């Protein structure tokens, strides 16, 4: 989603200015987008099969609710995204700037629409609503009773906004990283400066939105709907007013203590805009099960720490950019920008760990336990063998992805004439024949 947004902006700039630099960048980044899309499909489609193989009880229990949301994602989003992907990748100069931009926009719109349905389904697992438990015929299962309550669960909008903004942050960081690397290597200097000048304002805005809007809104949502998760995120054991927020720390779950550096009253202010607001601690929930608190605590603080780190990085880079364009010559700052995309990816990963581990031991919060959601025919050896297989497979795909991505970046943008020729030669023969007979086809 993040790189897609940057592609749309690049296409808009070329359409308005007709500057060939932006067209050259479009050809380059479309290839990178195709690689990212391919690895996303290859790794993501596995989960669709796991619902039937590893999570049969979960699929049976929530199928009436969850199935409709995933089906809608495929019908309304994935087909749109996949349908126009070929036009975006292979259209090149044969579609013309407007049609190519339209194809790119529809692919990116489909990606955002896909995220909407997926987050909608995942949010229902976090804060289930709009359903009832049907006891007959046995076994019991969740049945949707109100579609709008199901899709607009209390956690849906804050989580969707947070995912969108975080993805946009990674997309702008990727352009910054590649542009900064080219500047350090003294290669493709005009294109590198264009990438940095384009991506930096977006990165600044998204960095501030992450900490000031989307992140804080989600924290308040968690406080209202999943107080055990919130207490785990902050390692808070006793309910208290003027509750502190930890900067760094360590949780001893057996001793039920948290040690570290904290800011007094900050947690109370974040969840209620009131320094004296009372926040529930884990001890107040009695015998209710709680997640692995230290793991949730560390993942959450890694996400927050990295999110706040992006703000000074963005501001310093922006200051150097406007101060006689010294950013282009500041090697220390360019090195920081190169690694920023890796930090942004780590922040997103830590955020998902916080969300998914933080609701444990529930797979559907306070409705279905994770331990009861697996396939009953699977034994420990089966699960271990499949996990080892997927770890090996995903490791191979990860190495292959990094190799191909690095190769494309090392090669850099092709000269515009070569890129346009390649765009036509990469088409299937039948399409190529049509374009040769009708140069303005499409």
Image (spheres, rainbow, N blue to C red):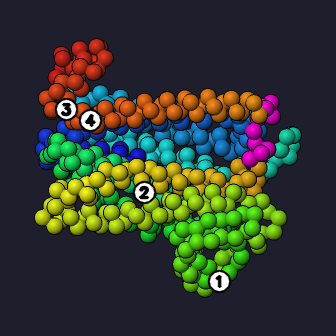
The CA distance from mark 3 to mark 4 is 11 Å
- Which region shows up in magenta? 370-379
Nearest-to-viewer mark from 2 and 4:
4
> Looking at the picture, how far across and down is residue 20, in whole percent?
13, 40
- What numbered label is drawn on residue 165? 2
Q: Are marks 2 and 1 in contact (CB under 8 Å)?
A: no
Say what secondary structure mark 4 lies in: helix
Q: Nearer the viewer, mark 2 or mark 1?
A: 1
Instruction: Give the image location of residue 299, x and y in percent.
Output: 56, 57
Q: Mark 1 Cα within 10 Å, few/some/many (few <14, many 20+)? A: some
Query: Which label was assigned to residue 415?
Result: none
Single out the mark in the foreground, 3 or 4.
4
Label for residue 414? 3
Of tags 1 and 4, which is closer to the observer? 4
Nearer to the camera, 224 or 65: 224
Q: Which mark is residue 241?
A: 1
Q: Secondary structure at mark 3?
A: loop
Residue at 47%, 46% in the rendered image: 113
Q: At 44% from the left edge and 69% from the top edge, which residue is drawn? A: 212
Q: Residue furthest bottom?
A: 276
């Amino acid at each position: 989603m993040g790189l897609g947004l940057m592609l749309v902006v690049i296409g808009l700039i070329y359409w308005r200015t007709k500057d060939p630099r932006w067209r050259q960048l479009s050809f380059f980044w479309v290839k990178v987008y195709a690689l990212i899309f391919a690895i996303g499909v290859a790794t993501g489609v596995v989960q669709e099969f796991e619902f039937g193989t590893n999570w049969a009880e979960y699929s049976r229990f929530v199928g009436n609710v969850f199935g409709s949301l995933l089906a809608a994602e495929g019908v309304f989003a994935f087909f749109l995204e996949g349908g126009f992907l070929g036009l975006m990748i292979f259209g090149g100069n044969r579609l013309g700037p407007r049609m190519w931009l339209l194809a790119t926009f529809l692919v990116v719109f489909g990606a955002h629409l896909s995220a909407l349905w997926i987050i909608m389904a995942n949010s229902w697992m976090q804060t289930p609503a709009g359903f009832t438990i049907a006891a007959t015929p046995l076994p019991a299962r969740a049945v949707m009773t109100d579609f709008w309550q199901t899709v607009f669960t209390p956690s849906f909008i804050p989580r969707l906004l947070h995912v969108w903004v975080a993805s946009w942050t990674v997309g702008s960081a990727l352009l910054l990283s590649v542009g900064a690397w080219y500047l350090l290597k003294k290669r493709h200097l005009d294109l590198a400066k264009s990438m940095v000048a384009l991506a930096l304002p977006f990165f600044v805005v998204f960095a501030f939105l992450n900490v000031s809007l989307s992140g804080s809104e989600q924290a308040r949502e968690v406080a209202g709907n999943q107080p055990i998760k919130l207490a785990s995120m902050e390692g808070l054991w006793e309910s208290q007013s003027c509750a502190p927020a930890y900067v760094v720390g360590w949780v001893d779950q057996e001793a039920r203590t948290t040690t570290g550096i904290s800011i007094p009253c900050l947690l109370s202010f974040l969840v209620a805009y009131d320094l004296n607001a009372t926040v529930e601690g884990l001890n107040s929930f009695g015998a209710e099960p709680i997640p692995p608190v230290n793991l949730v605590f560390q993942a959450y603080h890694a996400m927050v720490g990295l999110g706040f780190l992006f703000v000074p990085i963005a501001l310093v880079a922006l200051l150097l950019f406007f101060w006689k364009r010294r950013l282009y010559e500041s090697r220390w700052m360019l090195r920081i920008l190169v690694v920023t995309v890796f930090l942004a990816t780590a922040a997103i990963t830590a955020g998902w760990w916080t969300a998914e581990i933080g609701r444990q031991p529930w797979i559907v919060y306070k409705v279905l336990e994770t331990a009861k959601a697996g396939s009953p025919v699977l034994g420990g050896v089966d699960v271990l063998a499949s996990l080892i297989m997927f770890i090996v497979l995903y490791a191979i795909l990860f190495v292959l992805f990094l190799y191909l991505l690095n190769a494309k970046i090392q090669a850099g943008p092709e000269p515009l004439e070569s890129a346009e020729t390649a765009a036509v030669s990469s088409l299937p023969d039948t399409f190529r024949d049509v374009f040769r007979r009708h140069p303005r086809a499409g």
